[in-house]
Image (tube, rainbow, N blue to C red):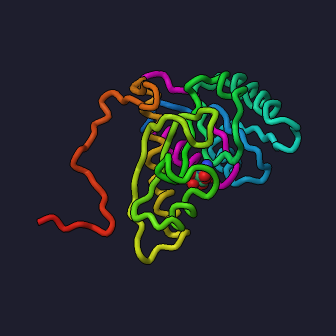
Amino acid sequence: MPRPLRLGVLVSGSGSNLQAILDACAARRIPAEVAVVICNVPDARALQRARDARVPTVVLPHHEHARREDYDSRVVAELRARGVELVCLAGFMRIVTPVLLSAFPQRVINIHPSLLPAFPGMHGVRQAFRAGVRVSGCTVHFVDVGTDSGPILIQAAVPVLDGDTEETLAARVLAQEHRIYPRAIQLIAEGRVQIDGRRVRIADGRPDAASTIASPPVEDP
Ligand code: GAR
């Protein structure tokens, strides 16, 4: 197993994706370790998850910084102080600036609850649900200066069912987030990911050309 990749995870809320990452690291399913969790919301549940896992935490309330760039400078300093090699945004509800992106070029990833480039921004599940899509899902992508617009690393799709509410769909999407985020980190940690323009190339990603989702299902003859 290679030396664990040092992760900095940025959170704002419940931290269920952080938990999935912590669990995957602890079980040694991925060659990574969480070096620090940074949170902009002092009472976020994610902080308790980090403490329970004995991971260092830093609380940086955003209202203490007038400019986004000043905030990101603090974030960069905290990440560097702990030797972070990959920055994972996991429900971090802030727009990041070039200050962070240039400090970690091609080393900032984000999870988003839609099949990007559809439904970027806030409330990805709500947007998809209201648009009436039959298939939705989640995406891990590299972060660029746009909103949820960077090169796509991994996606998982789920059916939208007739009886769904926004909440039941969100739960189905979130379950997939917890699968793909650790997988994305694993692929990067193993050095198998290369960005080629808009496209992310993955060495030995074991593609399965036969796997499909149709909603409603199609009964093949
Ligand atoms: C997740 O669904 C994540 O995809 C979403 O916030 C939730 C965080 O949940 N992120 C975005 O919408 C970013 N635009 P968590 O705190 O339980 O991981």
Residue drawn 50% across and 69% down? 168
Locate residue 12 relative to residue 199 in the image: left or right: right
Q: Is residue 33 found inside the magenta-colored segment of the image?
A: no
Locate residue 20 relative to residue 199 in the image: left or right: right
Judged from this view, the residue extending furthest toward the left is 221
Residue 63 percent location from the top left of the image: 86, 44
Q: Is residue 201 visible?
A: yes
Res. 74 image quadrant: top right
Residue 56 percent location from the top left of the image: 70, 36
Residue drawn 28% across and 54% down? 212
Which quadrant does the C terminus fall into? bottom left
Q: Is residue 16 visible?
A: no
Q: Nearer the viewer, residue 10 or 31?
A: 10
Q: Is residue 4 found inside the magenta-colored segment of the image?
A: yes
Residue drawn 56% across and 36% down? 109
Residue drawn 73% across and 53% down? 44
Res. 215 image quadrant: bottom left
Res. 199 image quadrant: top left
Residue 34 percent location from the top left of the image: 59, 35
Which quadrant does the N terminus fall into? top left
Residue 194 percent location from the top left of the image: 43, 24
Judged from this view, the residue extending furthest toward the bottom is 163
- Counting every numbered tag in the picture gives 0
Q: Which residues are magenta?
A: 1-28
